[in-house]
């Protein structure tokens, strides 16, 4: 027996990969599988990012797995607590025995003749290359480049005499005590870091080109914690999860249907959190509609508290250049800084940066069309997990894992070797893969697949709808084409 052949190979041991492993083990018990992880531990994002205050930007009832209740007191949890939850999930289900660490997948080549993927895997410790084979390839390594985050070109960057830090590579020994700190950006990372370092730093300035929507939210669900005590974890988790799923969906629909009213509501809520004379119009009134970009959670209003206490401030302006002592702005003002933190986003990747080939022809994912937001036209037996932008990532990760198991069981039951999404001529290209205007998305959209003019060639980003289509919809929908095993 070939020890390097598996029925399924999962790439990545973060949230998506752990979900994949659990569902494969439970729903496809006769299928062998391995999880290949390029790093030396599990957790993905939650182990990679080490900046102060790292936390979830969604409630843990929906960010947690459907199959494992979140039992923590905090509804918006810190990174170490999330990592412990993931580690517990892996050990409880014996998935640690399935994970191969320090294994980076460089290339995957499909052979229709052999009905198999050949995976080129690099041992990151020894640089040794080894081939694995599998019947089905499941990509769960996330959507961004782990090696480096996105940093735009800043003129004069080398002239700055202090430290420049990107949150994706946060130094363990960074000393910001009594230092002037400028954080460039106003997304989730920036608004997490600022209140977390404001007590020790001399002052923290959030420098933004334009404002973001913020929502102050308690980090504990007190009613939820009572329900956990009264009803037990499983029942309480199910109830709270259902409530939060449909609240998120309802609020997103409101943002789409009556954006002006929602915008007014959100900005008025921010006004209530800040001093009466604060310039909310300049610093907290975005020029786009709610949920055109992701809303940022502010647990217990901590960012607003830091501003009110004078420990943090917001500057809305454009950078002209870096100077020896800080940042020169287009307005002519200069921000003094000892440390500059570039919370400027991620570099997005498609298919975990793996080179894909089908029958020796290299695949350009941008020329394919998405099938159910998880497969690609003309690419057989491959699924890639991509979570929601308007809800918790895990909701879609779990759904995708369920679908993969349904699909594999269907193939085996019917005696098929493989399946492949095929687009007919009636389906037209209809917009970007994601309807989202965040900078880190728009600058990378050219890498992603096209979206079609009808289902299932659309990336719906709609959890209630996806539950029916993915969890219960027909596998044999005339869009997936099946090839039988040869006798």
Image (cartoon, grey):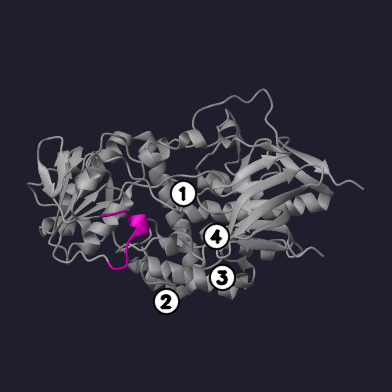
Query: Residues under labels 3 and 4: Cα distance?
Result: 17 Å
Residue receiving disc 1: 144
Residue bounds of the magenta highlight: 164-173
Residue receiving disc 4: 38
Residue 171 in the magenta stretch? The answer is: yes
Quadrant containing the N terminus is: bottom right
Q: Is residue 213 left or right of residue 1?
A: left
Q: Residues within 10 Å of mark 4 (few under 14, many from 20)?
A: many
- Kindly report which numbered mark, 2 or 1, lies closer to the viewer in this rendering: 1
**Residue 349 locus on image (x, y percent):** 49, 45
- The reply to whether the C-beta atoms of the residues labelled 2 and 4 are less than 8 Å apart is no
Query: Residues under labels 3 and 1: Cα distance?
Result: 23 Å
Q: Which mark is residue 229?
A: 2
- The reply to whether the C-beta atoms of the residues labelled 4 and 1 are less than 8 Å apart is no
Residue lying at the far left of the rendered structure: 277
**Residue 334 locus on image (x, y percent):** 11, 43
SS of the residue under disc 1: loop
**Residue 215 locus on image (x, y percent):** 28, 51
Reading the chain from its start, which is encountered first: label 3 or label 4? 4
Q: What residue lies at 55% left-to-right and 65% top-to-bottom?
A: 125
Q: Which mark is residue 90?
A: 3
Residue 178 in the magenta stretch? The answer is: no
- Kindly report which numbered mark, 4 or 1, lies closer to the viewer in this rendering: 4
Q: Is residue 439 left or right of residue 460?
A: left
SS of the residue under disc 2: helix
């Amino acid at each position: 027996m070939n020890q390097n052949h598996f029925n399924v190979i999962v790439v990545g041991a973060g949230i998506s990969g752990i979900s994949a492993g659990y569902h494969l083990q439970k729903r496809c018990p006769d299928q062998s599988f391995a999880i290949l992880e390029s790093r030396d531990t599990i957790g993905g994002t939650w182990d990679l990012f080490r900046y102060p205050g790292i936390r979830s930007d969604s409630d843990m009832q929906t960010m947690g797995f459907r199959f494992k209740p979140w039992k923590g007191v905090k509804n918006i949890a810190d990174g170490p607590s999330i990592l412990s939850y993931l580690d517990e999930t892996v050990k409880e289900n014996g998935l640690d025995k399935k994970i191969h660490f320090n294994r980076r997948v460089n290339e995957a080549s499909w052979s229709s003749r052999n009905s198999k993927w050949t995976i080129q895997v690099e041992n990151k410790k020894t640089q040794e290359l080894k081939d694995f084979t599998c019947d089905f390839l499941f990509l769960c390594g996330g959507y961004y480049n782990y090696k480096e985050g996105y940093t735009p070109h800043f003129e004069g960057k080398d002239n700055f005499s202090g430290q420049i830090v990107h949150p994706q590579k946060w130094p363990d020994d960074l000393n910001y005590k009594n230092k002037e700190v400028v954080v460039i950006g106003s997304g989730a990372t920036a608004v997490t870091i600022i209140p977390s370092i404001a007590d020790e730093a001399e002052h923290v300035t959030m420098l933004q080109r334009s404002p973001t929507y913020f929502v102050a939210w308690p980090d504990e669900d007190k009613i939820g914690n009572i329900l956990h005590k009264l009803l037990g974890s499983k029942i309480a988790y199910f109830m709270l999860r259902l409530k939060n799923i449909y609240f998120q969906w309802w609020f997103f629909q409101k943002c789409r249907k009556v954006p002006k009213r929602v915008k007014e509501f959100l900005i008025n809520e921010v006004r209530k959190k800040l001093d009466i004379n604060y310039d909310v119009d300049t610093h907290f009134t975005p020029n786009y509609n709610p949920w055109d970009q992701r809303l940022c959670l502010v647990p217990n209003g901590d960012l607003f508290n830091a501003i009110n206490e004078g420990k943090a401030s917001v500057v809305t302006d454009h950078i002209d250049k870096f100077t020896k002592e800080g940042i020169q702005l287009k307005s002519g003002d200069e921000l003094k800084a000892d440390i500059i933190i570039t919370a400027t986003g991620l570099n997005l990747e498609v298919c975990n940066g793996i080179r894909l080939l089908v029958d020796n022809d290299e695949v350009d994912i941008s020329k394919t069309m998405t099938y159910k937001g998880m497969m690609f036209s003309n690419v057989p037996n491959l699924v890639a997990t991509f979570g929601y932008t308007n809800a918790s990532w895990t909701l879609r990760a779990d759904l995708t894992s369920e679908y993969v198991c349904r699909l594999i069981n269907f193939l085996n039951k019917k005696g098929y070797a493989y399946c492949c999404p095929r687009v007919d001529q009636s389906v037209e290209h209809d917009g970007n893969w994601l309807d989202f205007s965040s900078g880190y998305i728009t600058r990378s959209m050219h890498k992603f697949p096209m979206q079609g003019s009808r289902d299932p060639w659309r990336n719906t980003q709609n959890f209630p709808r996806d539950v029916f289509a993915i969890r219960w919809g027909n596998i044999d929908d005339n869009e997936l084409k099946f090839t039988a095993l040869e006798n």
